[in-house]
Image: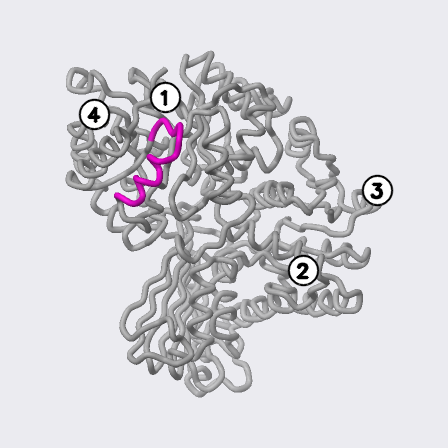
Amino acid sequence: MQIPRVLFGDNQFFGVNHMSEEKARAQQMRFQNLEAIIEVLDHAHAAGINTFMCTTHDRVEQICDHFRANPERYADYQFYPCMPYAHKYNNAATEHGMIEAIRMFLPQDGFVAALLKSGTALASKDVATIMGLLIDAEMKMFHGLKTPVIFMQNVITDLLLGLRMHSALRMFHDHVRSKYDAEPAYITMNLPLLLDVLEGLGIDNPVVCANINKVGFRMCGGIETYERTIANRRFRAIAMSVFASGAIPPREALEYVCRQPRIESIVFGASSRGNIQQTKSLIDELSAA
Amino acid sequence: MIRTAMVGLGKMGLSHLAIFRAHPQIDLVAGCDSATYLTDVLEKYTGLKCYADLDQMLAKEQVEALIVSTPSRLHAGMVEKALAKGLHVFCEKPFVLNVDDGERLITMADERKLVTQVGYHFRFVGAFRELARVVRSGALGKVHHVRAEAYGPVVLRPKGGTWRMSKEEGGGALYDYACHAIDLTNFVFGTPQAVSGVARRAVFSRDVDDEVYATLHFADGVSGQLCVNWSDESYRKMYTRITVWGTNGRASSDRQECQVYLRHPHPALPDVPAGWTVRNTTELTEEVWYYLRGEEYSAQADYWVKSIQAGRLDGENSFRSALMTDQVVAMIMNHTRQDGADAAAAAAAQWQPKHRGFFARLFG
């Protein structure tokens, strides 16, 4: 399975900015209408980026509706879902408690409702069943669209790493493979640690997305360790946060990332046609060099 | 390796468990929670030895340190048990609901020379540390006003059934949100001596406050404002900001960026010129060994470990430091007017609803 060299990210659409809350809020205002988001996705599409790597935010469902409604225009288009959008769980858990929050996000109909009502899965602590149901709930919004790679968000990947609940990483892998015939992938802030664990689980050559940037921002273990890891470990690397939220000038940032061996893909988010085109052509230029 | 146990495996607890378990100097030997569905999962899938009862865990496990991450009303009793057994303690915030308990626990820890720390993680955020550096340097001139704000989308409708919505258990925006803003104020500038003009009220909740506003009175007539509202959906997640005004400028920070405006350069801050200086989290954040949700959570865990190793008893967020925050919370709860408050505070205090009249129904 081929991963495109350039993926389009979604932080700018949902008010995530690691540099400035004010900037994040301005972006939230700008992108509160679906049309504004679609316009930017279309700019990216026109620049040759046909993959949207997006969290399972509630609003992504509307974006998906638009793509479903225009199948010819987006015939080559694909989504890389990243799940879950953690804040909806976090806020629900604060308000209702953890178990109730999990119940809330599971489908309420038929078999599942019966399962939950009887408390079978929860009571028997059948984590694989519950995780499968949660993945299915998150994947619902993408029905009918191409989702060849499915990511576990870093907050969950890294929580499982810290808790040493490694088998859950495997359960995610197996469910994504068997139910969606897709490539399971992981986002992490702890790249070397994750690779050790995945290797221990027998997951070969995993797709892993991690911060890779010249200033070492959120690269746990340090930039040298990351560089060694990228050069020597067997995995399919996707670099994110390559500009460290704007802390590094574009050319300098991309020169650094493109210089690293064996990085398959770069994900970035931008809001203007100019920035998207500039970044895409810079990556193309530096990747060809 | 520090043999450590942990009690309270709820929402914050699981996050702490992951961070402390990932720490190379911590040997996390056991966990404890009354919710057996959780401990069963942890035992089955992570191999953590679990107990349903703290006394039993402390009796059976030989540990040097305990992490307490239970609902707030349980903190005092559990911390006391740990200190009595000679354990170093990390306790989630707020420290205690009753300041008398806090005094007693501080004495116990002092007598036994035990390391204590409370989870005010914002003190480990690079941007707030930068703000504290700027304010403490004196470069702002004479400080005359401080504003502490915290907003977020926690309670957005009149339901919800966790302990965070229960008055008796230490729920409400005052304990959950305001104490962070108060603690940051203590950290960056100093502790208020009195409060007045308190408005605490529910927006949606039945039992607890969803918003808290108060005027803060510091030494030398410096005034402050506390503005807290956890029923604001316009924020994606908790947002905290501290702003300090002085005769030579203004400094303001949230967790992402510290903005400083100096009217004139100051010899105490040679790296900050006149005009605006903005420094962001990307440059201010120090790398941690393991990341989950924010470097500050790992940094505070590592700081506690280093305190234990070095026998540092007066470190950041010690029980003594955290009790100062609890004392301000108590002032707000009691609407009390402390000695030294100025006439404005006294006038404002008379306003406050001590009787069940119209204002009591409105604000109580």
Q: Chain of mark 1?
A: A
Say if residue A244 shows up in the picture: yes
Quick one: label 1, few (<14), some, or many (20+) residues within 10 Å? Answer: few
Q: Residues within 10 Å of mark 4 (few under 14, many from 20)?
A: some
Q: CA distance from mark 3 to mark 2?
A: 26 Å
Find residue B277 and name its label: none
A244 and B51: which one is in front? Answer: A244
SS type, badge 1: helix
How crowded pointer 3 is (Cα within 10 Å; few <14, some 14-19, many 20+) is rated as few
Q: Is residue B363 magenta?
A: no
> Where is mark 1, residue-wise?
A140
> What is the spatial separation of the Cα atoms under label 4 and label 2, in whole angstroms?
55 Å
Q: Position of residue B326 (x, y in %)?
A: 58, 66
User: Is A231 in front, or is B227?
Assistant: A231
Of residues A63 and B247, the one nearer the viewer is: B247
Label 3 belongs to which residue?
A: B60
Of the two numbered discs 3 and 2 in the rendering, the one whose residue sits closer to the viewer: 2
* Residue type of the residue flagged with mark 1: Lys
Going by the picture, which residue comes out furthest to the right? Answer: B59
Q: Which residue is mark 4?
A: A66
Q: Is residue A163 above or below residue B212?
A: above
Q: Tell me what residue is drawn at x 62 percent, y 62 percent.
A: B97
Residue tagged by mark 2? B307
Q: Is residue B358 visible?
A: no
Residue at image x 30%, y 34%?
A9
Asked if marks 4 and 2 fall on the same chain, the answer is no
